[in-house]
Image (cartoon, grey):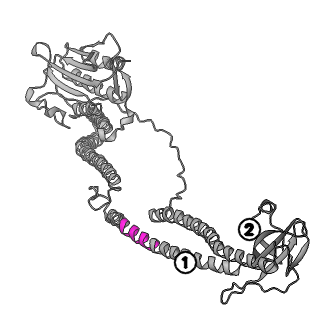
Amino acid sequence: MSNGEWAKPITHHPSPITHHPSPVNDIHSLRTHLMNWLFTPLFVLWIFSTASGYMATLNFANKPYDLALLERAQALGEQLGLGSGKERLNSRITLPENTIAGIKDQVYYSVSTADGKHLAGNATLPRPPASLSAKKGPVFSDTSRKDEKLRMVTLHYPYSGGGEILLQMAETVGKRQDLARGILGNIVIPQILLILMAAGAVWYALKRGLAPLEHLRQGVERRSRDDLSHLDESRAPEEVRPLIRAVNDLLERLNRVVESQKRFVADAAHQLRTPFAGLKTQAELALREEDSERKQHALTQILAGAERCNHLVNQLLSLARNEPNAQLVGALEPLELNNLAQETTMLWVPQALEKHIDLGFEGFRKAVPVRGDAVSLREMIGNLLDNAIRYTPPGGTVTLSVGYESGGGVLRVEDDGPGIPPEHRDQVFERFYRILGSGQKGSGLGLAIVREVVTLHDARIELDCGKQGKGMLVTIRFPHHHAF
């Protein structure tokens, strides 16, 4: 038995094309993305640092000036004789000096009773907050007078007239704010300079870091459309190398598909040239013939040639479809080999009866699970049966059997034809290989298609002699698959 062809035509069912609109590309460049993520937190931290630094500066600036304000208030209390029982509230006083050159703060004081009666002073000052008024020691508070911000200290003294007397001294905050601004400036300006220096350093580092990607982009851009060689990953950063390896894997698979298509086109062109040339010749003869009997013979030859062309085209399409590079792994699904093999065998009964061949099927007693593509498996079984029927002499037998061995399905096709000599058993799987002197017409694609389907399903194929050393036995063993 040698490889022949399967004449069953391949039917293509076009599926509706659904258009899925692509989402709007709103992704920034990698450089912009990194700059945003680096400097946005840095800017937020700078704002927080400035605000917290300003508050801390005000707090520290208040402490020495509060101490000076307290000393001036206590000195004023001594001038007025507060708490001595001999208060000199009407005496002419001199406010203690505590000024800085170029900054003149206004100083106000007020002496009043606990119930708010004004006794002396150069201004009427607001009472301290209720939450602080209960304290007996010095009470510092922030207040205002006529749109002027003031820092005030309140002292409590016993009053000879009974009860308590309050001394309030306040000053404007010019010196304090100037000191706070000076300290804050010494903090913020260096921070701004550091941020600018960091921005320059990061931008330069990103430019240098992304330079290999730019070099890679330029290399891909300069490539011709036929260049599917691997991209060079030696100069790429470590983080980008997995992506380049994935692209190289895709290029390798694409290259295999392209080579497969080129091989298919070359095979099709080579094999179709001769039969179509014969059709043309026979058609020209039919046109020139006037004798009806010879014209009928030419037309018969044209029909036979058209059938051979149909055979060849169908097998070329079947071969292209079953190449592993043209298949998707996700197309394989759980199947039951018993039913599939029996249904396919029934389709070949008419051809077997026409040649007076006993075609039999021996199923397994249980379900035989395999993972595969139903269409491809039917084409494989059909080609095996076609070869067996084609090369088995009239009156012979062809048997297809299904089994389950070592956890995997097994399919066997046995005939009592001439078989394949051992020296040809490796070559018969090559495309268009035919054994000379076999006496049968064919394209030499039958077993090539079988091999592609076997490869697609990770199965193994074995060629051996049939029973008693006669005929041919083809065994296909599928990989392990759990039973249903």
Q: Kindly indicate the quadrant of the structure image that contains residue 337.
A: top left
Q: Image check: 181 left or right of 210? A: right
How many other residues sit within 10 Å of disc 1, few (<14), some (14-19) or many (≥20)?
A: few
Q: CA distance from mark 1 to mark 2?
A: 32 Å
Residue at x 18% of width, y 33% of height? 429
Q: Position of residue 312 (x, y in %)?
A: 28, 36
Q: Which residues are magenta?
A: 199-209
Indicate the amino acid at tag 1: Asn
- Which quadrant holds residue 441? top left
Q: Of helix, strand and loop, which one carries label 1?
A: helix
Pick whichever, 203 or 180, lies toward us: 180
Q: Which residue is mark 1?
A: 186
Whichever of callouts 1 and 2 sits on the residue coming sooner in the sequence is 2
The answer to if 206 sits in the magenta stretch is yes
Vertical order, 172 against 317 (above or below)? below
For the point 36% across and 65% down, which residue is it? 209
The residue under label 2 is 138
> Seen in the image, is 36 located left or right of residue 281?
right
Q: What numbered label is drawn on residue 30?
A: none
- From what the image shows, is residue 366 above or below residue 93? above
